[in-house]
Amino acid sequence: MAHDPTESVCPVCLNRIAAERVASGERVCLVKTCPDHGTFRAVVWNGRPALGEWQRPKTPAILRPVSYETQRGCPFDCGLCHEHRQRSCTVLIEVTRRCNLRCAVCFAGSRPQDVLDPALSEIRNWFQTAWSLAPGSNIQLSGGEPTLRDDLPEIVAVGQAAGFGFVQLNTNGVRLAADGGYVKALKEAGLASVFMQFDGTDDAVNLQLRGRPLADLKRRAIDACADHGIGVVLVPTLVPGVNTDQIGSLLRMAIGLSPAVRGVHFQPISYFGRYPQPANGSARITLPELMAAIERQSAGTFKATDFRPPGCENAWCSFHADYIVLPGGRVQALHPARLFSGCCAPIPAEEGAQRTMAHVSRQWAAPDRRPAGPAPLAVEDPDGVGRSPASGPMRLEDFLDRARTHVFTVSAMAFQDAWTLDLERLRDCCIHVLDPIRGLVPFCAFNLTAADGRALYRR
C-alpha cells in the first residue's frame, strides 16, 4: 500500500492538516486526521489509468506579487498568494446571488431573494481588476442565475470593452428558453458561449436535482442559442444513483444537436455550497470511473483511451478529448488514442494556460459559417478518418469544412470539497473567482464549505 504525503483541511473546522494519498491497487483515498475531529477518508481516484500514470508535467508559473499579505498560507491567503503555481485561465465574475430555481445541488448556495445585485459601475471596476490580475483570460459570468439581470447584455459589453475576447454565460437556461429578444441582445453584446446546466435527458433527474421539470425548456434554450449563433456546452452535475446511468444518453443527445452544442462538460458532484444530506461526501464518481462509464455507455463510440490530462490545471483535476461529428452522427477522435501518460517533457505553466484559453474560446463558441468554396475533387482517405458510413470517402474540402464546424469536445472537471481538497492540486488551479476584496481565489477554495455549511471565502 503506497502512501504519498500532502496537505488538506479538516471538513469540520477547515483548519489545515497533514494528509496522505493512500493507494491500494487502483483505488486512491485521501486520508487525514484532525486532532480535534478525528480521521476522514475520501476516494479521489478509482480505476485505470493509475493516478501516477495520469500526468502532464509542467514547470510552475511565476506570478506577480499580490497586495494581499500572506499570513496563514494556502488555502487561506488567496489573492493569489506566492504559493500558487498557475495563472488564471478562466475568471468567474458573479453578477448576482439571486436565482429562479431552488436546486438540491448548488455550489453557490443561491436563494430566490438574496442581497442586492452589484451595480453595473461596480462590475465595470471588477473587469478592470480582472484585467490587471489576469489579462487576456476567458470570462465566465456566473451567480446565482445571471439572467435574472435585465442589464446582462450591458455587462457582456462591458467585458468586451475591457479587452476580454471570450465571455461565457453560466446559466440554467430558463430565461433563454422564453425570451428570444434577450438572447439576441446577449449575442449582439458579444456573448460567445453558454455553459448550460443540463443534468439528464428526462425530467425524473431534473425533479430530483433541480426541483421542477426542465427537459423541454432546456431544449428550447439550446434552440434559441443556435438561432442567434451562440455556442452551447452542456454541463451535467453527476450524482451517483441519480443520473450516472444517463452518461451515454446525454452524449448521444448532444451529438444529435451538434454543431449548436459544442460539447459536454461533466462535473462529478462536489460537496460544497448546498447539497443533499447527510453531508459526509461519500457518494462519488471519480475521473477514471467516469472515463470507463463513457466508453461503456456509448458502446465504445467514445473510448477511455481517447482522453488526455489537462495542460493548464493539475492533471488530477480533469480530462478532455476532441472529436469530429461526421454525417450520419458518427464521431471520430481527432487525436490518436492515448498509449500512456506522463511521457512528455514539462511545458511552462503559462504555455499550458495560453493553449487552454485558445482552445476553449475557439471550441465553445459557435462555429464561423463561412460560405463554401468551389467543389473540390474527392480524395481517398486511407485511415477512414473522414469516411461516412453511407457515402464512402469524403472530399477533402468537405472534411476540412466539417472539422471547422462540427468539432465536439467531451471533458470533465473534478472539483474538490472539504473531504477531497488536496493543496498540491489547489496550487495548480487556473479557474479563479474574482473576489472584489481579495482578488483572485481558486474556484474550489472560494466555494469550500465545512460539514455544517460554513464557508471559507464565500460571503
Image (cartoon, grey):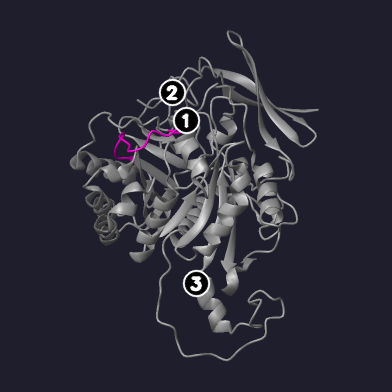
Counting residues from the start of the chain, the first of labels 1 and 2 encountered is 1
State which region is magenta. Answer: 94-107
Residue 209 x %, y % = 48, 36
Q: Is residue 143 above or below residue 111?
A: below
Disc 1: which residue:
445
Image point 20% across, 42% down: which residue?
120
- Mark 3: which amino acid? Arg
As for residue 105 lying within the magenta part, the answer is yes
- Mark 1: which amino acid? Ala
Residue 456: numbered disc: 2
> Looking at the figure, which quarter contains the C terminus?
top left
Counting residues from the start of the chain, the first of labels 1 and 3 encountered is 3
As for residue 213 lying within the magenta part, the answer is no
Dot 1: few (<14), some (14–19), or many (≥20) neighbours within 10 Å?
A: many
Dot 3: few (<14), some (14–19), or many (≥20) neighbours within 10 Å?
A: some
Task: Say left or right for 271 vs 337.
Answer: left
Residue 1 x %, y % = 81, 28
Element carrying mark 2 = loop
- Mark 2: which amino acid? Leu
Disc 3: which residue:
404
User: Closer to the observer: label 1 or label 3?
Assistant: 3
Q: CA distance from mark 3 to mark 2?
A: 43 Å
